[in-house]
Image (cartoon, rainbow, N blue to C red):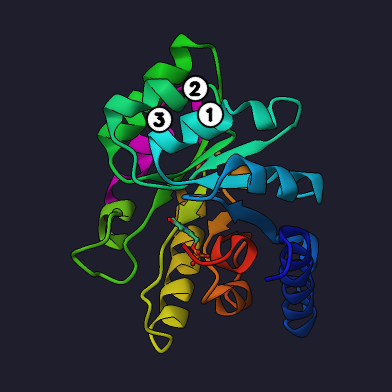
Amino acid sequence: MNSVEERLAAVRTHIDSICRECGRNPEEVRLIAVSKTKPASLVRQAVEAGQADIGESYVQEFLDKSADPELRDLEVNWHFIGHLQSNKIKYIIDRVCMVHSIDKLSTAKELSKRARAKELTVDYLLEINTSGESTKFGISPQELLDTAPSFFDLPSIRLRGLMTIASPDPRKAPGEFKLLRNLLEKLRSIAPDPSTVTELSMGMSGDFEEAIRAGSTMVRIGTAIFGSR
Ligand SMILES: *Cc1c(COP(=O)(O)O)cnc(C)c1O
């Protein structure tokens, strides 16, 4: 097996070549290395190879890893990308640079309350269920359009864009990515400050090519960097 450093380099090269093919600037696509179930030692290898943006999905694992002595001397931008219950927000709020997976107004309200109490401004994305699968978390497209103003009203947090996990079916994923991009345009049209609502967190190891072609600004890649789970 190749090292984390080699796999990271291969993924970055791949992202650059897709961007070139579709006429995008590679700097518009931020790579988030998803380290769930993988040890802090591998995160260390990634960060030392220049990969500062790291994604985690489970609260307890994230808390353990972000406090691991192995990473103490390193600067890591932690992205929380997994399902988040309101009662767990207090544990993660001052350790994350962005929460990708807010899927309810009540959770956003709790994020706002906790951010305000700590005098922080927290960036977040709304997770959208673009595939309509009942097993997936996320706000439906219609609900997003109906409730978006309430999200923009909350203090101490900033809605920066949208996130989705596409269907594993490669015939369906491209349409879901395009749907997310269209929803972002609609969200921007009602945003108090559209210049801050720009992020599309979409694309994983199996589908990041299509996601980048559809306008992704953040790809969340685990397996292709850290190996299978
Ligand atoms: C695990 C996970 C990823 C990374 O998936 P890979 O297929 O391993 O690249 C991306 N996004 C979310 C929300 C995840 O939970």
- Residue at point 29%, 30% (across, down): 86
Q: Residue furthest left?
A: 134
- Residue at point 44%, 10% (across, down): 117
Q: Is mark 1 within 8 Å of ligand 1?
A: no
Of the numbered discs 1 and 2, the one sitting upstream in the chain is: 1
Can residue 112 be seen?
no
Does 207 sit above or below residue 182?
below
Does 174 sit above or below residue 154?
below
Disc number lying in front (2 or 3) = 2
Task: Sort mark 2 into few (<14), some (14-19) or many (20+) by Cα contacts within 10 Å.
Answer: some
Residue where numbered disc 1 is placed: 122
Q: Is residue 101 left or right of residue 80?
A: left
Highlighted range, magenta: 146-159
Is residue 147 rendered magenta in the image? yes
- Residue at point 76%, 85% (across, down): 21
Q: Amino acid at mark 1?
A: Val
Instruction: Tell me, yes or no, whether the two marked residues, 1 and 3, touch with CB atoms within 8 Å.
Output: no
Q: Is residue 113 left or right of residue 132?
A: right
Place residue 223 in its image quadrant. Answer: bottom right
Of the numbered discs 1 and 3, the one sitting upstream in the chain is: 1
Q: Amino acid at mark 3?
A: Asp
Q: Is residue 4 left or right of residue 110?
A: right
Q: Which mark is residue 153?
A: 3
Q: Nearer the viewer, residue 12 or 144?
A: 12
Secondary structure type for disc 3:
loop
Q: Which mark is residue 156?
A: 2
Does 149 sit above or below residue 37?
above
Is residue 150 rendered magenta in the image? yes
Q: Give coordinates of residue 202: x percent, y percent.
A: 52, 63
As measured in the structure, the alpha-carbon distance from the residue carrying label 2 to the one carrying label 3 is 10 Å
